Image (spheres, grey):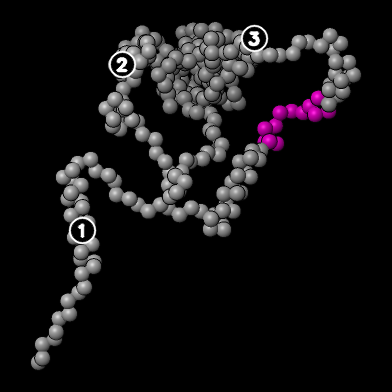
Amino acid sequence: MWKGVVRFGMVAIPVRMYLATESKGVSFHLLCPECKGPLRNKRWCPHEDREVSWSEVVRGYEVGQDEYVEITDEDLEKLPTSSAQTVELLSFCADTEINDLYLQRGYYLEPEKMGVRAYSLLRDALEKTSCVGLGKVAFRDREHLVRIASHGAGLVLHTLHWPDEIRAQAELDLPGRSEDGHGREMDMALILIHNLTEPFDPTRFTDEYRAALEAVVQEKVDTGTVAPKPAATPARSTDLMAALKASIEESRHSIWVKRPRRRTRRRQP
């Protein structure tokens, strides 16, 4: 999804970036309650009272109440940022220093052939120092703060939230620290945590909700309770002449179907 260069110091590593995760959640479609057909969202302009196609849509940045400045692809390409094609590692820190709240989405980095040696050098150096690299990269119409770390045989890049995107806990009504340290309750809690402590193994956990819902769906398929497909309806035409022609063709077909066939008498030899 992105191709560029990871740079630290004078070392440049050409890489390709791929999504490291995928969503496996259950999603629903919104249906019409009568015909059970899927509902469609339209890009509708209330001022011109018409649907707007994707090819017509433009970007707009709001500068005031109902006031927008149009931003074109040319404007984005001319932005004076070096992070569009380069991840510049500006600093390094211990991985434990980054609060989990900052982590967003993970991406695998794969080296181009000419950058294999430099790629393995950065991976091994990060692994030996238990450090991660911090930098910036621009894609999907915005610049991201990123963290690059060693991961197995490769490197993984995580986008991070910007500091002003992390909400302060001061907004929450949280309890204060207990003066007595919770006494006997704390002792019992520590024993429980100790007894349940084990190495992290994500394969022990399964999405029971998704499995149960898929079972319900399969049962409905097996018992024939799937909603039938709605009958196809002709698209409405906004062109009066086209609508008239379509109506005439339909009426001709209707007359031909209703009209009985004429019986032809055989001629006597």
Estimate the x, y position of residue 102 in percent, counting from the top left.
58, 16
Image-quadrant location for residue 158: top right
* Residue closer to the observer: 184 or 261: 261
Q: Secondary structure at mark 3?
A: helix
* Residue closer to the observer: 74 or 107: 74
- Label 1 or label 3, whichever lies nearer to me, is 1
Label 1 Cα crowd, 10 Å radius (few <14 / some 14-19 / many 20+): few
Q: Amino acid at mark 1?
A: Ser
Asked if the residue under mark 3 is in contact with the one under mark 1, i.e. CB atoms within 8 Å, the reply is no
Residue that label 1 marks = 251
**Of the residues under marks 3 and 2, which one precedes in the sequence?**
2
Q: Amino acid at mark 2?
A: Glu
Q: Secondary structure at mark 2?
A: strand
**Of the residues under marks 1 and 2, which one precedes in the sequence?**
2
* Residue closer to the observer: 240 or 149: 240
Estimate the x, y position of residue 50 in percent, counting from the top left.
28, 32
Give the distance between the C-alpha atoms of the residues marked 1 and 2, in whole angstroms.
49 Å
Q: In the rendered view, would you say 23 is above or below 118? A: below
Question: Where residue 170 is drawn, which disc sits there?
Answer: 3
Q: Amino acid at mark 3?
A: Ala
Quadrant including the C terminus: bottom left
Q: Is residue 73 left or right of residue 126?
A: left
Q: Which span is picked out in magenta?
A: 193-205
Question: Where residue 176 is drawn, which disc sits there?
Answer: none
Image-quadrant location for residue 78: top left
Instruction: Evaluate whether residue 159 shows in this view.
Output: yes
Question: Where residue 70 is drawn, which disc sits there?
Answer: 2
